[in-house]
Image (cartoon, grey):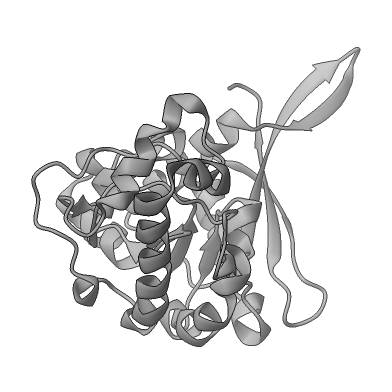
Amino acid sequence: MLVLLPPSEGKAAGETGPTLDLGSLSLPGLNAVREAVLEELVGLCAADETKAQEVLGLSQGLKGEIAKNAGLRTAGTRPAGEIYTGVLYDALGLASLDARARRLAEESLLVFSGLWGAVRIGDRIPSYRCSMGVKLPALGALGAYWRAPMAEVLPAAAGEGLVLDLRSAAYATAWKPKGEVAGRTATVRVLQSKIVDGVEKRSVVSHFNKATKGRLVRDLLTAGLRPKDPAELVAALRELGYAVEAEASAKGGKAWGLDVIVTEL
């Protein structure tokens, strides 16, 4: 099982850990592109604060992120699972997983990033600010820039089992599973169900979409479940108490769509 996650905009500080070693990161086939993005991002933030603020889409209150980016090569690092924070990661609660669940998390979770492409939760990275929606002056839009190297590296990382895609739209642009891999990929949408005047109404949730996805992954990990394909995932989630509706692909080469229905947020 491979679980694709978005990063968080807010991140914990790297503090006093060792400095970045690109060679230590998972998916080494991405390292040349990581170096190229890192080089331009650091150079931009060190040379022109005004331009960097514009390119990164930062408010005045977030201008401190520019200096952080300028110092990425000498900043302290922490495991990515500690760097990423926010609603999804709070619900996932990596720090409180037992040893078995933690091992499964380290094997199966892959966090997408505008700067690193994708990292596993044990990879040591510094705190940074660079979303997949950023368009760097020389390299261009990062979602498009990552597409070719991701297409070369990610199919092997996906192995032969389920790919559970929980990424937001911006991060999904960097890699779209194709062919046989797509056929064992499941995307998840969270819908809230309400009864209004005796009729069920469903709506897409945003903030609680992230929380539900975090809880869903945590429940799979703590139960030690490794679904092999979308059909097994549906069965596993229902066993865990989730209300799930699945739309299987009518033809090969297309991901399954899963709706998780919640009545309380």
Q: Pick whichever, 32 or 53, lies toward us.
A: 53
Whole-percent x and y of residue 180? 63, 86
For residue 43, what is the image quadrant?
A: bottom left
Whole-percent x and y of residue 199? 90, 22
Whole-percent x and y of residue 164? 53, 62
Placement of 95 over or under 70, stated as above or below: above
For residue 23, what is the image quadrant?
A: bottom left
Q: Residue at x 34, y 39 (%)?
A: 11
Whole-percent x and y of residue 250? 82, 74
Q: Residue at x 60, y 54 (%)?
A: 133
For residue 203, what is the image quadrant?
A: top right
Answer whether residue 129 is visible to the viewer in this image: yes
Quadrant location of the C terminus in the rendered image? top right
**Count of numbered marks:** 0
In the current view of this chain or complex, which residue is farthest to the front? 47
The answer to whether 102 appears left or right of 175 in the picture is left
Placement of 30 over or under 39, stated as above or below: below
Q: Pick whichever, 213 or 227, lies toward us.
A: 213
Answer whether residue 220 is visible to the viewer in this image: no
Q: Residue at x 52, y 69 (%)?
A: 163
Q: Pick whichever, 259 or 39, lies toward us.
A: 39
The answer to whether 126 appears left or right of 227 in the picture is left
